[in-house]
Image (tube, rainbow, N blue to C red):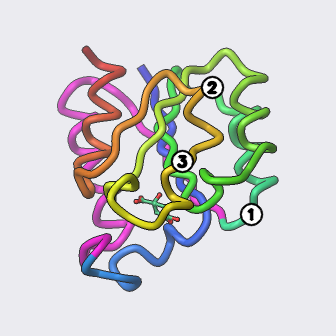
């Protein structure tokens, strides 16, 4: 089992931006924990982050992973391009958010990605990624 852990816009700033919302660990720290979690369960992980919508689409189209854990960041709320990329492949995608998007601003309550994802995990900080990865390993 190989998983792609895919992060979108501004997630490279994790640990430095809004630490009260997203924590103080960097994306690299979090990815190391996800890698250890997957390795202990015999799964392989690949990590990719981009601030560019089209690069996220290309990665979704070209991955050889068995599943994708996707935190698209703000793209979640308006990117029909990423939505269509997800719909165009057979690879299952689990949508992730570290924060509880339903307890924040109104615009965060809309995800244009959710209807084409297998499921969504939100509100558990870095553990949202771990829980999403686990969903592929059950
Ligand atoms: C986020 C929530 C989004 O609304 C926001 O734009 C992000 C991060 C999260 O992980 O909680 O960049 O996806």
Please tell me which residue is depicted at 81% across the width and 53% down the height of the picture: 54
Where residue 19 sits: x, y (%)? 29, 81
Q: Element at badge 3?
A: strand
Location of the N terminus (image quadrant): top left
Earlier sequence position, callout 3 versus callout 1: 3
**CA–CA distance between discs 3 and 1?**
12 Å
Q: Quick one: SS at disc 1?
A: loop
Of callouts 2 and 1, which one flags the residue occurring earlier in the amino acid sequence? Answer: 1
Say left or right for 119 vs 112. left
Quadrant in the rendering for residue 87:
top right
Of the numbered discs in the image, which one, if any, rests on residue 116?
Answer: 2
Q: Work out which quarter of the rendered image holds the C terminus and state it.
A: top left
Q: The magenta stretch spans which residues?
A: 21-50
Badge 1 local density, few (<14 within 10 Å), some, or many (20+)?
Answer: few
Residue 47: say if magenta.
Answer: yes
Res 103 → quadrant: bottom left
- Look at the picture and state if 49 lies above or below 61: below
Dot in front, 2 or 1:
2
């Amino acid at each position: 089992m190989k998983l792609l852990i895919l992060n979108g816009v501004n997630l490279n700033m994790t640990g430095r931006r809004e630490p009260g919302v997203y924590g103080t660990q960097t994306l690299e720290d979090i990815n190391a924990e996800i890698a250890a979690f997957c390795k202990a369960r015999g799964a392989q992980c690949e990590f990719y982050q981009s601030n560019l919508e089209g690069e996220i689409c290309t990665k979704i189209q070209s991955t050889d992973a068995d599943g994708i854990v996707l935190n698209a960041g703000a793209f979640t709320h308006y990117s029909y391009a990423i939505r269509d990329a997800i719909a165009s492949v057979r690879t299952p995608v689990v949508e992730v958010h570290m924060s509880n998007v339903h307890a924040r601003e109104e615009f965060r309550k809309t995800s244009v990605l959710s209807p084409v994802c297998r499921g969504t995990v939100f509100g558990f900080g870095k553990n949202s990624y771990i829980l999403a990865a686990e969903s592929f390993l059950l």
